[in-house]
Image (spheres, rainbow, N blue to C red):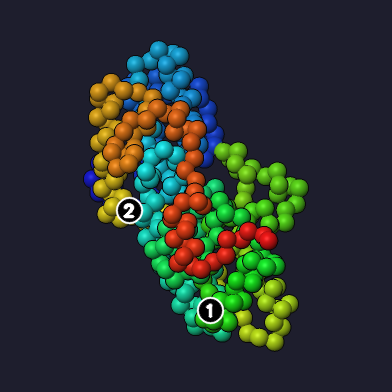
């Protein structure tokens, strides 16, 4: 039945967002006689898994509850990485390459790519480092501004004068504080209770056009906006992620068979470990902008640090 599933994109199990009903879930586990439950998802799912584990324990059910960390954003804390991340970074290269080609083919051309990453910019960061065609990488962990000395517009003007084109990669959660919102938009939540983000890519494209029309009204200028959001996660896993998933699954099953419950299986410093569910649920894997990887991004792109002076 499951033969060949690992070679397909998406999920045969299907996904859900919101609608968490603890009683209904644990009642279903109990009524069906399950003694092993593997809960696959990101940090929100891990928080739900903690509640399921505690309810199972409260009812004194003989059920092992195990978390399998899954998010292409790579924002699950403690573990080295989550599966799907490396495939997403690999697929993002196609969008960046297309943006570069389009930008180079125009006079004063800018290629703008929006990548997944609500609260963390790991995909944008690693895609930038892998590509080395990116002139500016914007992520949620590093604030930026548009106008004035040290701002994005000043940097882009210099880059266009020097090279004739530029490529920008922006994570979907970057710059949300800069985008004007109505009161209704400020209060809007998704099914899981998370704030609904506005389209930073569309907003930035509009702001770039306004800036150039204002400061250089008689000069040609083009912005090509590419949003591969779902394309980078709807593909089959690459070989690295495929192997990782196999090892992750084996590790989780061995933990359950050894009698453990309430844990997450995942690699820490390259070694597979069993981590308490509640520890993983409360941690978030953010980009450390004082880390060497962000320094590499600054070095590769020559972008400003966006610190106002």
Nearer to us: label 1 or label 2: 1
Give the farthest residue toward the right.
Answer: 183
263 vs 204: above or below? above
> Residue 185 in the image: x percent, y percent?
70, 49
Point 43% across, 47% down: residue: 74
The numbered mark at residue 82 is none
Q: Secondary structure at mark 1?
A: strand
32 vs 224: above or below? above
Point 40% across, 56% down: residue: 88
269 vs 305: above or below? above
Q: Report the Cα–Cα distance between label 1 and label 2.
A: 33 Å
Residue identifier under label 1: 165
Is residue 226 visible in the rendered structure shown here? no
Point 40% across, 27% down: residue: 276
Structural crowding at the residue carrying mark 1, measured as other residues with C-alpha within 10 Å and reported as few (<14), some (14–19) or many (≥20) = many
> Residue 290 in the image: x percent, y percent?
50, 51
- Residue in front for this viewpoint, 202 or 306: 306
Q: Secondary structure at mark 2?
A: loop
225 vs 80: above or below? below
Name the side, left or right, on which 262 lies relative to 175: left
Point 50% across, 22% down: residue: 23
Is residue 182 visible in the rendered structure shown here? yes
> Residue 40 in the image: x percent, y percent?
40, 37
> Residue 42 in the image: x percent, y percent?
45, 40
The numbered mark at residue 237 is 2
The image quadrant where one finds the N terminus is: top left
The image quadrant where one finds the C terminus is: bottom right
Structural crowding at the residue carrying mark 2, measured as other residues with C-alpha within 10 Å and reported as few (<14), some (14–19) or many (≥20) = many
Name the side, left or right, on which 260 lies relative to 21: left
Name the side, left or right, on which 268 lies relative to 226: left
Nearer-N-terminus badge (1/2): 1
């Amino acid at each position: 039945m499951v033969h060949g599933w690992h070679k397909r994109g998406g999920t045969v199990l299907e996904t859900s967002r919101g609608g968490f009903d603890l009683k209904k879930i644990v009642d279903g586990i109990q009524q069906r006689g399950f003694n092993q439950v593997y809960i696959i998802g990101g940090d929100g799912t891990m928080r739900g898994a903690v509640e399921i584990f505690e309810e199972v324990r409260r009812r004194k059910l003989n059920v092992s509850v195990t978390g399998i960390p899954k998010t292409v954003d790579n924002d699950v804390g403690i573990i080295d990485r989550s599966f799907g991340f490396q495939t997403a970074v690999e697929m993002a290269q196609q969008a960046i390459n297309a943006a570069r080609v389009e930008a180079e083919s125009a006079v004063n051309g800018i290629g703008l790519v929006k990548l997944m990453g609500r609260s963390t910019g790991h995909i944008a960061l690693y895609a930038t480092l892998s590509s080395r065609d990116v002139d500016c990488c914007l992520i949620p962990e590093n604030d930026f501004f548009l106008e004035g000395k040290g701002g994005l517009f000043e940097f882009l003007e210099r880059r266009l004068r020097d090279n004739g084109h530029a490529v920008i990669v922006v994570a979907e959660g970057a710059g949300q504080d800069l985008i004007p919102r109505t009161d209704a938009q400020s209060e809007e939540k998704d099914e899981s209770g998370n704030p609904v983000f506005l389209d930073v890519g569309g907003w930035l494209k509009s702001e770039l056009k306004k800036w150039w029309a204002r400061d250089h009204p008689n000069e040609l200028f083009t912005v090509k906006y590419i949003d591969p959001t779902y394309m980078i996660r709807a593909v089959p896993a690459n070989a690295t992620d495929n192997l990782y998933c196999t090892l992750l699954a084996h590790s989780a099953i061995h933990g359950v068979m050894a009698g453990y419950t309430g844990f997450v299986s995942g690699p820490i410093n390259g070694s597979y470990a069993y981590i308490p569910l509640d520890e993983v649920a409360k941690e978030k894997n953010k980009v450390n902008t004082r880390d060497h990887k962000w320094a590499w991004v600054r070095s590769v792109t020559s972008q400003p640090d966006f610190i106002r002076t």
